[in-house]
Amino acid sequence: MVVGAIERDSNVVAMPCNEFKQKDVRNLILENVDLKNSEIFTDEYKVYSRVNKIISHSKVNHGSKQYVNGIVHTNTIESFWAIVKRQYYGQHHHYSKKYTDKYIGEAVFKYNHRKETSENVFYSILEKVLYV
C-alpha cells in the first residue's frame, strides 16, 4: 500500500504504508502539507472521512460517477498512480515489499523532476548522493 498527495502543477509526495488507514493519511498531510494555505481534494473513500478535522477538505463521489465538481477532482494524483503502475508493469514487473519505498521514491523523483533538463536531473542526483 502507498499513500500520496500532489500539488497541482507541482510536486508529489508518496510513501509506503502497511495498511491504508486514517493515521497514514493524517501523517502524510501533517508532514507535507501547509495546513493553513491548502485544501485537500479526495474521493469518497472512508479513510478520508476525518481529514476535515485538520485541513480544509472537499471530495468527489466516484461511486455516484461524480469525477469533477468545479475545481475538486483527483485526476492529478490518479495520473501519478498511472505512472507508478506503468513503471511497475513496464520496468520492474514485480515489487518486493521490502523495497517498495525505493520504487516509490524513484517514481516520485522522476515525477518531481519531469520538467528539468537531463543535466539538472543529473546534478540533483549527484547532490543527493554526495550529501545524504
Image: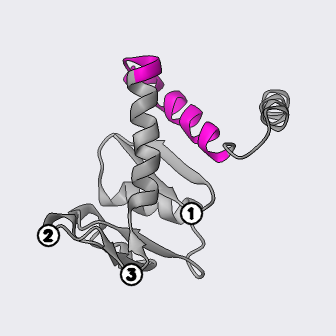
Front tag of 1 and 3: 3
How far across and down, in percent of the image, does residue 57 sit?
39, 78
Residue 74 position (above or below residue 119): below
Q: Is residue 67 found left or right of 31 in the rendered image?
A: left
Task: Determine whether 53 is above or below 14 in the image.
Answer: below
Q: Residue 10: horizontal and vertical position, in percent?
A: 63, 59
Q: Which residue is mark 3?
A: 70
| Residue contact between numbered discs 2 and 3, judged by CB atoms under 8 Å | no
Q: 18 or 2: nearer the eye?
A: 2
Image coordinates of residue 41 in percent, x first then y, are 40, 71
Count residues near mark 1 (Cα–Cα under 10 Å), then give few for <14, some for 14-19, many for 20+: some
**Up/down of 27 relative to 120, above or below:** below
- Residue type marked 2: Ser
Give SS at disc 2. helix
Give residue 118's mark: none
Residue 16 position in % (x across, y down): 43, 40
How packed is label 3: few (under 14 Cα within 10 Å), some, or many (20 or more)?
few
**Residue located beneath label 2 in the image:** 64
Which amino acid lies under the numbered mark 1 shown in the image of this protein?
Glu
Span colored in magenta: 90-112
**Residue in front for this viewpoint, 91 or 101:** 91
Q: Residue at x 38, y 63 (%)?
A: 74
Helix, strand or loop for disc 1: loop
In the rendered image, the quadrant that contains the N terminus is top left
At horizontal 33% and vertical 72% (from top left) the residue drawn is 68
Disc 1 marks which residue? 7
N-terminal-most mark, 2 or 3: 2
- Between marks 2 and 3, how big is the CA–CA gap? 16 Å
